[in-house]
Image (cartoon, rainbow, N blue to C red):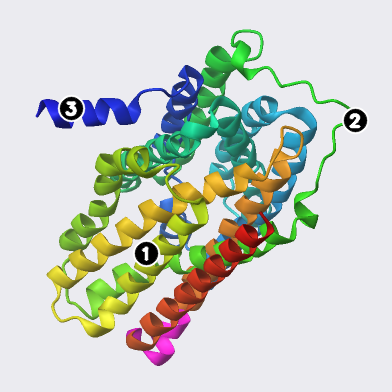
Amino acid sequence: MKKIAALYTEAYSGLAPSTWWLSLVMLVNRMGTMVLPFMTLYLTESLHLSISQAGFVMGLWGIGAICGGFLGGKLTDKFGFYYIQVSTLAGGGLMFMVLGQMHSYIPICITTFFLSLVNESFRPANAAAIAHYSKPENRTRSYALNRLSINIGWAAGGALGGFIASRNYELLFWIDGFTNIFAAGLLWFLLSPGKNTATSKPVVSKEAVTHSAYKDKPYLVFIVLTTLFAYCFFQLFSTIPLFYRQELKLTESTIGLIMALNGILIALFEMVVIHNIEGRRHDLQYIVIGTVLTALSFIAFNILPGAAMLAIGAMLIGTVGEVLSMPFMNSFWISRTSNNNRGQYAGLYTVAWSVAQVLGPSTGAVIAERWGFTTLWWYIGGVCLVAALGYRWLYGRLRGEA
């Protein structure tokens, strides 16, 4: 037990205090994330909109997120990550409250787009902040700690949100709004430049050469490949639960437990794993391995027998793939940045995930409905393997240039 305790202590040690404070802010913010998971139910059951209308509203959220990625990246480079984080958290909080008061279709559409635009502009600034507070030798762990906060907050917020939604949907908007504003206040109290010297933006020489993320060809290839990976990954929250229910005949409670397994394993083991392997190989090598494992987790549905055990086994494989890929994706793009262009890179990375979030669930559902889940899993597994081959090619190219 002492060895295990020492292992975990070592895995979490060495991170900057500001990294911990930022993760606390993210935890508070994500614990209040209650609107989005229940948005479709709210629109159809409480406001009596059609399924197609609700789908259009969610599509607008995705478009707003894409625009927010670009906008947040540019503003971060211009004004600094701290000010963009505070303003987007506070602005998003106010807009959540406003959206809760909208009861007509057109105002809901307009408010949803601008809420998503403001809310998602936070992500590039947050990613740049993590890079700023961390050191190269513990940067991957810093991002892993942030992911841990997101997973814990999302799980707690989702569970509490379900309880509240069963009684009063409108209350979700108030809670989401107030937690956003509270997170902004916490950020100001703990990490404002006047109170925390670590937040002070480094002075960038005017003569410093700045390369644009939009002209960084290897990075643009990386963004395309990451979009493909994220496209597959988002099946986890859309078509996979449907497959569990319709094809494997699992109960809702069993599905919930299996889905929770992913977050639990990440919370327990990701930091320890990252601590032990960080820096031993190139980031892209770990990403290749993780992407291949993610592909196998989908293909397993077509080649392995069973129901609950099949679902658990595939989830285990996919979780290992996630641990070996996503933290190192952050480390890779950060390694190509400087203090005065980090927002651009973070913005494009945010856009990649936002595009995948729009396309993944919708196209996956159509494929499953028209051609069946077997076709879907071969297709998703194939896309993921293409991404893995692309990452491997990119690694070879960069190694050759070096």
Camera-nearest label, 1 or 2:
2
| 345 relative to 289 in the view: left or right | right
Task: Assign a secondary structure to mark 1.
Answer: helix
Say if the magenta span includes residue 366: yes
Q: Secondary structure at mark 2?
A: loop
Q: In terms of secondary structure, where does tag 3 sit?
A: helix
Which residue range is magenta in the image? 365-373
Q: Is residue 396 above or below residue 129?
A: below
Q: Residue at x 58, y 38 (%)?
A: 127
Q: CA distance from mark 1 to mark 2?
A: 46 Å
User: Which label number is shown at residue 207?
Assistant: 2
Q: Quadrant of residue 227?
A: bottom right
Residue highlighted by disc 1: 236
Looking at this view, name the residue that lies furthest to the right: 207
Image coords of residue 107 (percent x, y): 66, 53
Does label 1 or label 3 sit earlier along the sequence? 3
Which secondary structure dominates the residues rendered in magenta? helix
Residue type indicated by callout 3: Ala
Residue displayed at 53% across by 28% down: 134
Q: Earlier in the sequence, mark 2 or mark 3?
A: 3
Q: Residue 291: which quarter of the image?
A: bottom left
Indicate left or right for 45 with 115 as reference.
left
Report if residue 218 lies within the magenta region: no
Residue 35 in the image, given as x and y percentages of width and height: 46, 46
